[in-house]
Amino acid sequence: MNLDHASVWAKCLSVIEDNISAQAFKTWFAPIKPVKLDGHVLTIQVPSQFFYEWLEEHYVSLLRKTVRKELGPDARLEYSIIMEHIHEGASSSPYTVNMPTTEVRATRNAEVAMPIVGEPAPIKNPFVIPGLRKLNIDSNLNPNYAFDSFIEGECNRLARSAGFAVANKPGGTAFNPLLIYGGVGLGKTHLAHAIGLEIKNRQPDKTVLYVSSERFTHQFIDAVRNNTVNDFSHFYQMMDVLIIDDVQFFSGKEKTQDVFFHIFNHLHQTGKQIVLTSDKPPVEMQGMEQRLLSRFKWGLSADLQVPSLETRMAILEKKMYADGIELPREVIEYLAYSITTNVRELEGALISLVAQASLNRKAITLDLAKHMIDKFVKNTAREVSIDYIQKVVCDYFDLPIELLKSKTRKREIVQARQISMYFAKKMTKSSLANIGLHCGGKDHATVLHACRTVNNLSETDKHFRKYLEDLEKKLAIH
Ligand code: ADP
Ligand code: MG
């Protein structure tokens, strides 16, 4: 057979593309170039050390699987990294690293069909637990999602502490089930894993299983097809702690709800812990059987809110620290100010930014951040926020932002406040009332008056006009 590196890599890419998000594919795989194929060894070129580390950290098992699929079980992947010129003079000789062939960390979400460890493959019916030996399953927990890396804030205080209580005493608190709900990207999955990890840490003997409701549903459908529903139920009934993520996915699936109902009852009656997450509170769940909904309400429902600015900054800083990334403070601030409602997008923006800077060998500046955020983060509002305007204005005049938001009538504060209102009206879609509310609790008439004053001053006062021009540049998205 005549294989060449380009066609092998193209085939790998087509598999990879189906398995990850479009954004991730574009960011991490599009820049890779296949360079040679030597027997079983495929060499690919990546733009920087950072890329290599990121691929290793996040995509190693996917890469390994796809390469083996194309080149057989002995396949190996080698990276050729283009040297970074930024610090190191002009050396451009690529050096290669072998992909470690040792296993990825075991608690990572495995891609196996059913998490029974140590079973000789292939298993016909994965739910049959051989003999009565202690159930030894892969808990499917992601070690990156621990309590340690979950930043606490007003937005998650209740859910986090309830989760922690449950982790201390699974099945032994009033929080059973514990239902964590909230919008996308607010940390439900992270918290669910954290609970499982903490329990495993404290009590390694407990049988803990994290499963997405999608996976649960698919397994159930397979069990129906293979006539193994009893085994399926028994398997789940043997858990000490069952964590099911995104239960809203059960909506409208009566049979799945039915089997889950029985599993739920069994676990609950025998004092086992159930942790659920959902994108909405039980009262708003549609297409869910009443008897199941009423059980969801037995324990505690705790919500995750949108994090405050301080919490968003803390999350970014934690993330940077964990990934060994350094960014200028103003860039962090810009990200935290601009992406307000979804922590996943916030992190995505950070990572895209670092990747792009590394790819193009550019320093990470505020300008680059502004440019990138628009291009790479979907759904990001293209308008600046009132908070951001206030911050830029206060920085410019060197005033504390608390004063601007207060009711003080000191002259320089009044002026900064009026300028903020002016830009907020010009650059955001906020109502006058909302702008007023953000700027010391003023009413809409005050905002209109402020805009008029700023317009008048800019026509008569040269210095004032210069302030506005400077600020306008700072606030521009591009
Ligand atoms: P959800 O399941 O609610 O959609 P995730 O749990 O997947 O959200 O969170 C999205 C990303 O945001 C994850 O990478 C997670 O680690 C991160 N994240 C969310 N909230 C926090 C937090 N309070 N502290 C640290 N990271 C967080
Ligand atoms: Mg989730």
Image (cartoon, rainbow, N blue to C red):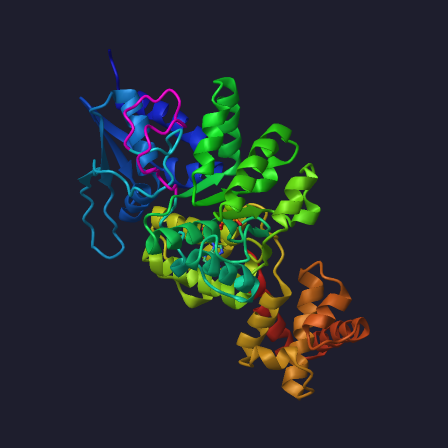
| Residue 196 sits above or below residue 226 on the image | below
Residue found at x 43% / y 45%:
240
Relative horizontal placement of residue 314, taking residue 105 as reference (left or right): right
Q: Nearer the viewer, residue 148 or 2?
A: 148
Is 129 colored magenta in this rendering?
A: yes
> Over which residues does the magenta segment extend?
118-140
Residue 164 in the image: state x and y as whole percent. Answer: 46, 60
Quadrant assignment for the N terminus: top left
Relative horizontal placement of residue 1, taking residue 32 as reference (left or right): left
* Residue 72 visible (yes or no): yes
Which residue lies most toward the top here? 1
Residue 393 in the image: state x and y as whole percent. Answer: 59, 73
Which residue lies most toward the bottom here? 410
Quadrant assignment for the C terminus: bottom right
Residue found at x 65% / y 72%:
420
Residue 375 in the image: state x and y as whole percent. Answer: 52, 46
Residue found at x 60% / y 50%:
183
Q: Nearer the viewer, residue 117 or 440?
A: 117
How many numbered circles does the render carry? 0
Relative horizontal placement of residue 364, taking residue 298 as reference (left or right): left
Q: Nearer the viewer, residue 66 or 460?
A: 66
Question: Which SS type dominates the magenta stretch?
Answer: loop
Is 229 colored magenta in this rendering?
A: no
Residue 355 in the image: state x and y as whole percent. Answer: 38, 48
Residue found at x 51% / y 58%:
173
* Residue 334 visible (yes or no): no
